Image: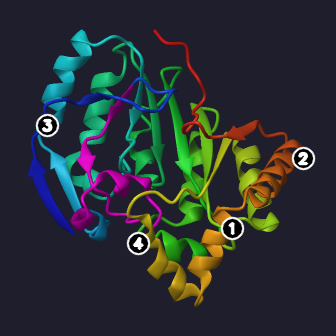
């Protein structure tokens, strides 16, 4: 892993997601290296090909954040929207924790999305009505997860995060991106929905969206599973009737288990909070 230090001019960037006003991204790059990550689409080809092997640490981001919370209009801050805020480098630099300390009690609502149990470290901060916490789970099948999320925490570790925060803060489970043939089976769908039910979590779901550079990462991962799988997956991705069927299966499972759910588009639709 290559870790480099950079400086930033802004800590709270305007978010392109309709339910977030700002994004707080203390790191650029992500150790988890998920083969489908949408963040690679904003990178150069060289960096996209190296996804999962580099992290840039914004060394002055807390200093900048302290200034910006004093002058920016209050709203919802997404932590973090371009990389996992609790990837391993956070253990050393604690820029996510320090950022939450600055935002907490400042009048901003803090919305966190992660797939790491490291977020449990900050349970002393992440509590009360000023927070919501989302956990990404593509599949509960560990073998499948290892193929497309090579360095991410295991699915059951992520499930533990939802269980631990249940009843302490608003939680949501992001079921996605759903990859045809790997995560779309009824058994996987019902297992994920059952977890959301157990934890009292809202469920958001989204299909695989093949953005810029993603094929360079995803094709080799899928072809290692089965020859020709990438092309089969792409055929399904383009089939709207197929997605209608998958989404119908998810929504039926949610009704069966009493889970509030909705598609994540036109953005990753975290529960909407009143703007302050």
Identify the residue at image location x=77%, y=51%. 247
| Residue toward you, 102 or 145 | 145
Please say whether residue 150 is visible from this viewpoint.
Answer: no
Residue located beneath label 3 in the image = 8
Q: Is residue 29 above or below residue 112?
A: below
Mark 4 and mark 1 in contact (Cβ < 8 Å)?
A: no
Real-space Cα separation, disc 1 to disc 4, in angstroms: 18 Å
Real-space Cα separation, disc 3 to disc 1, in angstroms: 40 Å
Identify the residue at image location x=16%, y=61%. 3
Give the mark nearest the N terminus, 2 or 4. 4
- Quarter location, residue 213: bottom left
Identify the residue at image location x=40%, y=42%. 81
Residue located beneath label 1 in the image = 236
Q: Horizontally, is 111 left or right of 207 in the view?
A: left
Give the mark nearest the N terminus, 3 or 1. 3
Residue located beneath label 2 in the image = 256
- The residue stretch that appears in magenta: 22-47
Residue located beneath label 4 in the image = 217
Q: Position of residue 218 (x, y in %)?
A: 47, 72
Mark 3 or 1: the one toward you: 1
């Amino acid at each position: 892993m290559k870790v480099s230090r950079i400086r930033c001019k802004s800590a709270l960037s305007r978010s392109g997601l309709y339910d977030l006003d700002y994004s707080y991204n203390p790191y650029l790059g992500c150790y988890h290296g998920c083969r489908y990550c949408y963040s690679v689409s904003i990178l150069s080809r060289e960096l996209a090909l190296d996804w999962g092997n580099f992290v840039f640490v914004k060394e002055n981001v807390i200093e900048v954040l302290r200034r910006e919370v004093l002058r920016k209009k209050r709203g919802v801050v997404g932590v973090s929207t371009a990389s996992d805020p609790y990837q391993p480098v956070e253990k050393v630099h604690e820029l996510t924790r320090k950022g939450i300390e600055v935002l907490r009690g400042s009048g901003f609502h803090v919305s966190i999305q992660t797939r790491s149990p490291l977020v449990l470290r900050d349970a002393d901060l992440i509590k009360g009505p000023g927070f919501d916490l989302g956990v990404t789970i593509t599949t509960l099948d560990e073998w499948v997860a290892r193929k497309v999320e090579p360095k991410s925490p295991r699915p059951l570790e992520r499930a533990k995060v939802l269980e631990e925060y249940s009843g302490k803060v608003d939680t949501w489970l992001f079921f996605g991106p759903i990859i045809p043939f790997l995560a779309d089976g009824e058994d996987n769908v019902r297992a994920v929905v059952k977890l959301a039910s157990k934890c009292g979590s809202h469920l958001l779901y989204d299909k695989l969206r093949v953005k810029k550079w993603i094929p360079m990462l995803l094709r080799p991962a899928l072809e290692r599973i089965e020859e020709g799988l990438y092309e089969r997956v792409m055929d399904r991705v383009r089939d709207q009737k197929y997605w209608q069927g998958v989404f119908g299966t998810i929504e039926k499972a949610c009704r069966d288990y009493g889970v509030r759910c909705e598609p994540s588009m036109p953005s990753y639709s975290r529960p909407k909070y009143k703007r302050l």
